[in-house]
């Protein structure tokens, strides 16, 4: 097997590269990264020492893809992963579209020419914001829980399913990923190569670059340990908003099965992939864990709403379980402990990853 991973020196890409190398030592694994993310260079040498080939290039530039070797599969882990991208003043809307959509188009053209399969790592933020923001919720055990008094299509106590609306608005970030999903499926159908789309929940683990908008679990723990200012933003400033949690290495078994399946496989091409309800945690509950593990801290209150925020986002991954017998292996507590140990061993991590 010849495997190409985009964004290979990012948090998700590097974890996948390590996991595949350890599980399949005979595979040829390479990847491309533009290294614009602070901290990403730290992953290059460790991957190369494992025998992973790392190429410097930008998927936004077709000429950079022309120098790539042929492969059997591409896993697209390259993206600007912030829901605030394009509107927060840190990056332009055009930059966001170039990163998350134009880059995907270039990769699909590469797969078309190379006859390679394509796996897109998408996001839970493709789901429509207004109905999610309007869900009835109740604060239970220091975190929001949905109160489903009436039927909401695509939502159950287990989470948000693939049947939930993807109607706009979904944020500019969500729109680029949703457009990428549609184009990937169309390219695969038109040109006869296999495509899988995995809508991932919040990724977390040791070595995640700590910015609040791109890795809240890692950022919160690192900032807590280093006594950086922390705030509960929106929703009355209580920290009750809930997210699920998934370690990227837990994608290994799913991705392996998908790559073993052919273009004619009849399983649904789009599925949610997340830690699910059992992994879900509010910021307030995360603070409780940090207090027990790292000591007491005071968190400031900022009740002002934040763009695109929603009170409760837990993905229902029952389709992935049904189709692939897939379920995450690492618990949230294991992931949090992994992050805490890494934070203790890397006191300059927030600075290195551009968070301060």
Image (spheres, grey):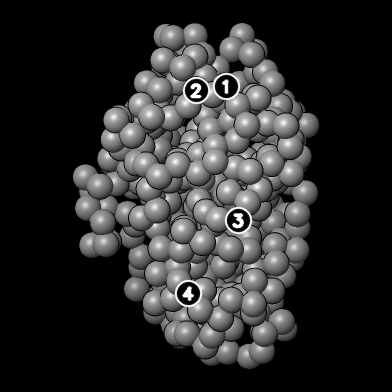
Residue designated by label 4: 350
Which label lies toward us, 3 or 1? 3
Residue 260 figure quarter: top right
Give the distance between the C-alpha atoms of the residues marked 1 and 2, in whole angstroms. Answer: 7 Å
Is residue 161 visible in the rendered image? The answer is: no
Q: Please tell me the numbered disc located at residue 46.
A: 3
Q: Residue 14, how many percent across, how many down?
A: 57, 50
Q: Please tell me the numbered disc located at residue 70.
A: 2
Query: How many badges with numbers are in the image?
Result: 4
Residue designated by label 1: 72
Q: Which of disc 3 and disc 4 is earlier in sequence? A: 3
- Determine whether the residue tagged by mark 1 lies in a helix, strand or loop: loop
Q: Which of disc 2 and disc 4 is earlier in sequence? A: 2
- Residue in front for this viewpoint, 39 or 307: 39
- Determine whether the residue tagged by mark 4 lies in a helix, strand or loop: helix
Give the distance between the C-alpha atoms of the residues marked 4 and 1, in whole angstroms. Answer: 37 Å
Q: Please tell me the numbered disc located at residue 336.
A: none
Which label lies toward us, 4 or 2? 2
Which label lies toward us, 1 or 2? 2
Q: Residues within 10 Å of mark 2 (few under 14, many from 20)?
A: some
Q: Is residue 141 above or below residue 190?
A: below
Q: Is residue 299 above or below residue 21?
A: below
- Determine whether the residue tagged by mark 2 lies in a helix, strand or loop: loop
């Amino acid at each position: 097997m010849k495997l190409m991973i985009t964004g290979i020196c990012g948090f998700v890409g590097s974890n996948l590269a390590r996991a595949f190398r350890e599980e399949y030592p005979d595979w040829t694994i390479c990847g491309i990264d533009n290294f614009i993310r602070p901290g990403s260079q730290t992953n290059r040498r460790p991957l190369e020492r494992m025998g992973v080939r790392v190429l410097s290039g930008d998927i936004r530039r077709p000429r950079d893809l022309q120098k790539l070797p042929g492969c059997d599969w591409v896993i697209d882990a390259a993206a600007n992963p912030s829901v605030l991208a394009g509107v927060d003043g840190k990056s332009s809307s055009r930059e966001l579209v170039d990163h998350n959509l134009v880059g995907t188009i270039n990769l699909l053209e590469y797969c078309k020419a190379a006859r390679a399969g394509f796996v897109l790592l998408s996001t839970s933020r493709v789901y429509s914001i207004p109905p999610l923001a309007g869900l009835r919720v109740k604060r239970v055990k220091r975190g929001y829980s949905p109160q489903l008094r009436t039927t909401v299509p695509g939502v159950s106590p287990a989470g948000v399913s693939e049947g939930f609306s993807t109607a706009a608005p979904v944020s500019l970030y969500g729109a680029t990923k949703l457009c990428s999903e549609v184009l990937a499926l169309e390219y695969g159908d038109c040109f006869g190569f296999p495509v899988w789309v995995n809508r991932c929940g919040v990724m977390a683990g040791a070595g995640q670059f700590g910015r609040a908008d791109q890795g809240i679990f890692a950022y919160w723990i690192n900032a807590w340990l280093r006594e950086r200012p922390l705030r509960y933003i929106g929703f009355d400033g209580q920290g009750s908003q809930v997210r699920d949690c998934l370690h990227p290495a837990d994608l290994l078994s799913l991705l392996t099965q998908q790559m073993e399946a052919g273009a004619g496989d009849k399983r649904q091409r789009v599925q949610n992939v997340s830690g699910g309800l059992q992994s879900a945690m509010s910021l307030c509950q995360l603070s409780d864990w940090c207090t027990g593990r790292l000591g007491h801290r005071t968190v400031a209150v900022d009740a002002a709403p934040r763009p695109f925020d929603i009170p409760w986002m837990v993905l229902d991954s029952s389709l992935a379980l049904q189709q692939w017998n897939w379920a995450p292996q690492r618990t949230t507590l294991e992931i949090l402990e992994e992050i805490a140990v890494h934070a203790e061993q890397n006191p300059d991590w927030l600075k290195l990853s551009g968070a301060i």
